[in-house]
Amino acid sequence: MDAVIQLENLQVKLGSRLILDHLNGALSGKCIGLLGPNGSGKSTLINTLLGFYPPLAGRVRIFGKDVQENLRELRAQIGYMPESDAFIADMTGVRFVRFMAELSGLPKGEAMERAHEAFFQVGLGEARYRKLGTYSLGMKQLAKLAQAIAHGPRLLLLDEPTNGLDPEARQRMLQLVRDIRDTGEVRVLISSHLLHDIEECCDEVIILKEGKIAALCNLEEERKANLKFLELEVTNENGFLESVRDLGCECASFGAGRLKIVLPDNIEVRQLYKLAVEHSVQIRRMNYRRDSLEDIFLKAMMNGATPAPAGQKALSHGRL
Amino acid sequence: MAVYKRSYKAYSGALTPAWSRFTVLTRYGLGRLFDSRMFTAYTVFCFLPLLAGLVFIYFVHSSAAQMVLGVKFGRQPLINNEFFLGFLWIESWLGFILVAWAAPGMISKDFANSSIQLYLSRPLSRAEYLVGKVSVLAALLSCTTWIPALILFGVQAEMQGNGWGWDNLWIARSIVVAGLLWIALMSLLSMALSVWVKWRIAATALFFGVLFFMAGFGVAVNQILRTRWGWLLNVPQMIFIVWRALFRVPLSWVELHRDTVPLWSAWASLLAICAFSLWLLNRRLRAREVERA
């Protein structure tokens, strides 16, 4: 799949602080998650993608085009939903979205039609003639999404889309993002500090830490690679661990009989049972477990930021 | 696509020309202003001097009308450069109220609600954003200042005949230059102040303050320092000095005996205000604030 966003030795400095430090990588997922703790540079990266901040060094490409050199063209293809409130309080919802669509270059008639469509799509059809200032927080978030999609962008940048939403509204927002992603007509980049949101929507994730890429991995591949990742709880180890290793499995003991094992393709689970019998070990619990995004995130935070060369994954598939 | 088809679809149709995007801001800006009946009524009121001017020109040139009213205008030409200067001065201050009403809300709301980032995330530069907003004020002020004055000039030229229009073409030029100077000054100053003060009422108060309280401060400077350069802080006075020169109206007896500043310094102070306003706008008109460590 072609890269949507390419970061080439990107450095961004704001004031005297270096916020993004030598970012390298190619993001090509349908839905890309941008993760990181507060102050890690997520919003700065989004603002750099939008051309708000010029890079100190390096460059960013979107759809293969340099952002700074093709700003106007690229902005016409981007839909942006900011994290903070951004609206015109005394305008009706549909007029606001139409206005934004016209600024993106749509003719009046088309803008009006697509503004109505966008409002129905996000589920605010009945409230579209109300003034934005009267909307609840959840409705404002949806209106922000409507203005971001009304002009039919090829890339959607969503900055904390579920911020401040109750669980029901949050699920609705995530479902909308998935629906948009599944049309295949738009690539989505979601910035969030909520791992669950990213895990539900994204197939690729970039994790920032202190302005550097701490991890960049394809979640789909990660999930496939961890199909034979087992968690075991046994009564005693009695040489069982060594025998499992002799089979060719990667394994680790976490004490109190808790083991983690990665089975290679040629090893069946029943062989573990045989070994357990041979070593008189009782298997009390066995779970297939995949590396969750939380594991990947925590691992990235513990490992520290390791800048990855262009095109290379900063973190390989989850291992023990 | 109909509204019941509730799935995302990319847009692949025609786009409007890139150069015309700022006009969307202008159109919506004017639309929002004229949503207010009060504003619409006041805008209509601003055209009353034009109506009065037209009636006056008609009476000056119509002996029958003068007979009906029982008045007789002397031979001295009443419709001259001083007439147009006076007309423009009245219209400009009516226009000033329009600007004080419209400008703060137009731009400070974008900052108060952070919608500026939505504008600038689209194919619209900061300069185009500013041009779009200034065009709203320029359109309003044009309709209430130099355009009505030119209409009067045309009517006078037509009724007077005998090549009056050609002989006094410099007055038309002065009307346009004076009008554009007023528009540039008022638009940029009001925008710059609105950008820095996000609260609409405060922005309006500051706008009045800069124009009138600064004048008082200038007088105080003159008195305390025994100088005349305090006049440079009096923006209306500086505008009047420049306009009077443009319309070739001589100084009055009072002004001849009062220390005033030279014409070049009046021009320089007005241009400096425009430049300073642009600098303020350039500093503030950004999608994102950068906090310097």
Image (cartoon, grey):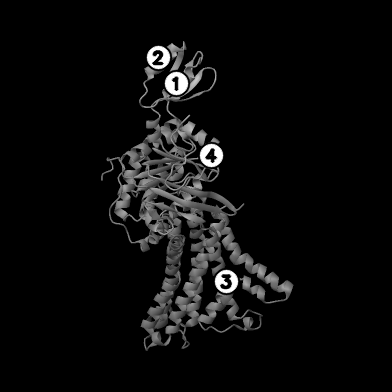
The amino acid type of the residue labelled 1 equals: Val
Disc assigned to residue A274: 2
Q: On the image, numbered disc 4 is attached to which residue?
A: A37
Three-letter amino acid code at the position of disc 3: Ala
Please report whichever mark, 4 or 2, sits nearer to the chain's N-terminal start: 4
Q: Disc 4 versus disc 1: distance between alpha carbons? A: 38 Å
**What residue sits 62% from the left and 81% below the top?**
B255
Residue A288 in the image: above or below residue B8: above
Q: Is residue B113 visible?
A: no
Q: Position of residue B101 (x, y in %)?
A: 50, 59
| SS for dot 3 | helix
Label 2 environment density (alpha carbons within 10 Å; few <14, some 14–19, many ≥20): few
Instruction: Give the labeled residue for mark 1.
Output: A244
Residue nearer the viewer, A224 or B277: A224
Q: Position of residue A9 (x, y in %)?
A: 48, 52
- Is A249 located above or below residue B9 in the figure? above
Give residue B174's position: percent from left, percent from top.
Answer: 47, 79
| Contact (Cβ within 8 Å) of mark 4 with mark 1 | no
Q: Chain of mark 2?
A: A
Q: Quadrant of residue B161?
A: bottom left
Tell me the distance, in whole angstroms, between the alpha carbons under discs 2 and 1.
11 Å
Q: Are marks 4 and 2 in contact (CB under 8 Å)?
A: no
Which of the marked residues, 4 or 1, is nearer the chain's N terminus?
A: 4
Q: Left or right of A253: which side holds A181?
A: left
Residue A212 x/y as whole percent: 52, 45
Helix, strand or loop at label 2? It is helix
Q: Residue at x 41, y 76 (%)?
A: B150
Marks 4 and 1: which is nearer the front?
A: 1
User: Which label belongs to residue B22?
Assistant: none
The nearer-to-camera label among 4 and 2 is 2
In the foreground, B140 or B149 = B140
Q: Quadrant of residue B149?
A: bottom left
